[in-house]
Image: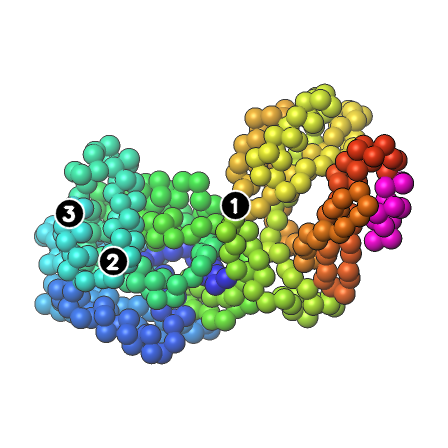
């Protein structure tokens, strides 16, 4: 499985995402990307990738100009755009979300209030591949829904300000195109750093994260961090929300390429968004991870064997439920997809004996398992731990016996071979032939496995 991991410790903005993803491409695909973006689909827009360095880290800055002017710079006609608040708050100057104002209060030539229909028409003019066009429209739908909630107006009446500008459209379309070119099987994102303080936008001075950004980051792990200023923009938040499938630390993978997207501002921390592309596990039909290579243990002393990806371990302590109630909860969890459920006796506060209930499930099933824990147990909190899991390769075989066919579980891996007769089959034979389990095991040969 090809995994794309996005590390957003210094936030996320459209141009930084573009630069980091562009950095992952081989040279030939980089040329193809720039040629497409500069083919004239967006009038007056030019995209270039420039080398940049932040705190000694070499990366790429994606420069988008409209009629020769880059966001946050003086236009080619000599007019002055007052980028209010950017120096004071220290946000990434490339943020498409800032609305430049001329000194007399007018708007710069390429700054416009664009509705969803106009954005869709501009995206269509770029002649993007069908799936890229669809992705870009979906990202703008998320932005429109966020603006609708924040301002209390219907989606169809939304007028984009900063995110409707030509450079923002180029950032969103470019990011969607780059992801299609990279074609990851899974996208994982770190917790997103938002920054803090205030920011000058088209609507005035707003808190950081801006209201639309905060709306888009709902249910996504995020933190303010230590940098004052807007680190995550609405565009960055919308792209992350649309493409990321899960959030957390970098998953176990063999890294093949690393890209750094650089912002304009300089901080004590490297102002970069890092993208890492790696190989991990093939996706099976049920969504569980399966090994792409037999030995993914790196320099481990373990012998070669399959790695089964991640398993989620959920735990809670219970001291006010009956054994019957706990057994019922465990049964519901197993029926709803848990891999295993077990209990451990524990001592709890005030000297009370209690039960530690542990649930193992696939990461993609953990929300359902947590919901079951809260619904069917008395717990008020659940702990989560993501664990790597090593598995022996397993298959079911059948053996002929005097009492019928006996299923045998066969497992191999890490230098070990194991066989075990299916207990249900042994129990069925014992009942049908009025034998003890010991006799059945001996007569079928199961006791020699």
Q: How many marks?
A: 3
Q: Earlier in the sequence, mark 2 or mark 1?
A: 2
Q: Residues within 10 Å of mark 3 (few under 14, many from 20)?
A: few
Is residue 433 shown in magenta? no
- Report the disc number at residue 6: none
Mark 2 near mark 1, Cβ–Cβ under 8 Å?
no
- Report x, y in % for residue 419: 78, 54
- Where does residue 331 sit, x and y in percent of width and height? 65, 30
Q: Which picture quadrant has residue 47?
A: bottom left
Q: Is residue 184 above or below residue 23?
A: above
* Residue 219 location (% of width, % of height): 44, 40
In this view, which residue lies farthest toward the front? 402
> Which range is magenta?
438-449
In the rendered structure, the answer to whether residue 354 lies left or right of residue 252 reads: right
Mark 2, residue position: 130
Give the left or right position of residue 333, taking residue 94 as reference: right
Q: CA distance from mark 2 to mark 3?
A: 17 Å
How far apart marks 2 and 1 lie (CA) works out to 28 Å
Residue 228 image offset from top left, x and y in percent: 40, 51
Q: Earlier in the sequence, mark 2 or mark 3?
A: 3
**Residue 148, quarter of the rendered image:** top left
The residue pinned by badge 1 equals 364
- What residue did someone put label 3 on? 117
Q: Residue at position x 29%, y 57% from top?
A: 131
Structural crowding at the residue carrying mark 1, measured as other residues with C-alpha within 10 Å and reported as few (<14), some (14–19) or many (≥20): some
Is residue 16 something that shows in the picture?
Answer: no
Mark closer to the observer (2, 3): 2
Please tell me whether mark 3 sits on a helix, a strand or a loop. Answer: helix
Report how far apart the C-alphas of labels 1 and 3 lie in the structure. 35 Å
């Amino acid at each position: 499985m090809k995994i794309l991991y996005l590390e957003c410790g210094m936030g996320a903005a459209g141009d930084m995402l573009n630069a980091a993803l562009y950095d992952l491409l081989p040279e030939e695909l980089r040329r193809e990307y720039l040629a497409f973006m500069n083919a004239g689909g967006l009038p007056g827009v030019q995209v270039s990738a420039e080398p940049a360095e932040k705190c000694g880290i070499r990366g790429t800055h994606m420069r988008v100009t409209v009629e020769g002017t880059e966001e946050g710079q003086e236009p080619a006609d000599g007019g002055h755009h007052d980028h209010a608040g950017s120096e004071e708050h220290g946000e990434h100057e490339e943020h498409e979300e800032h609305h430049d104002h001329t000194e007399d209060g007018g708007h710069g030539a390429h700054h416009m209030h664009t509705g969803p229909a106009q954005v869709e028409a501009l995206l269509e003019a770029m002649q993007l591949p069908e799936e890229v066009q669809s992705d870009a429209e979906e990202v703008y739908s998320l932005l429109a829904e966020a603006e609708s909630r924040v301002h209390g107006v219907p989606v169809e009446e939304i007028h984009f300000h900063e995110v409707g500008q030509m450079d923002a459209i180029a950032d969103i379309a470019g990011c969607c195109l780059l992801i299609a070119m990279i074609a990851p099987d899974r996208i994982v994102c770190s917790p997103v750093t938002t920054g803090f303080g205030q920011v000058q936008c088209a609507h005035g001075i707003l808190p950081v994260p801006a209201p639309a950004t905060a709306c888009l980051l709902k249910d996504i792990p995020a933190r303010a961090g230590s940098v004052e200023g807007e680190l995550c923009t609405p565009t960055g938040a919308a792209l992350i929300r649309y493409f990321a499938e899960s959030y957390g630390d970098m998953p176990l993978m063999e890294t093949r390429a690393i890209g750094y997207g650089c912002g304009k501002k300089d901080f004590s921390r490297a102002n970069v968004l890092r993208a890492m592309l790696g190989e991990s596990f093939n996706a099976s039909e049920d969504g569980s991870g399966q090994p792409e290579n037999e030995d993914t243990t790196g320099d481990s002393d373990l012998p070669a064997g399959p790695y089964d990806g991640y398993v989620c371990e959920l735990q809670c302590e219970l001291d006010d439920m009956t054994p019957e109630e706990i057994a019922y909860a465990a049964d519901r969890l197993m029926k709803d997809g848990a891999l295993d459920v077990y209990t451990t006796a524990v001592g709890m506060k005030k000297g009370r004996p209690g039960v530690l209930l542990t649930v193992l499930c696939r990461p993609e099933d953990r929300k359902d398992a947590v919901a079951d824990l809260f619904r069917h147990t008395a717990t008020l909190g659940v702990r989560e731990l993501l664990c790597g899991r090593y598995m022996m390769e397993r298959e079911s075989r059948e053996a002929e016996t005097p009492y019928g066919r006996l299923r045998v579980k066969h497992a191999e891996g890490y230098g070990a071979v194991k066989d075990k007769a299916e207990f249900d089959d042994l129990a069925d034979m014992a009942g049908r032939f009025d034998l003890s389990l010991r006799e059945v095991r001996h007569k079928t040969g199961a006791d020699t496995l």
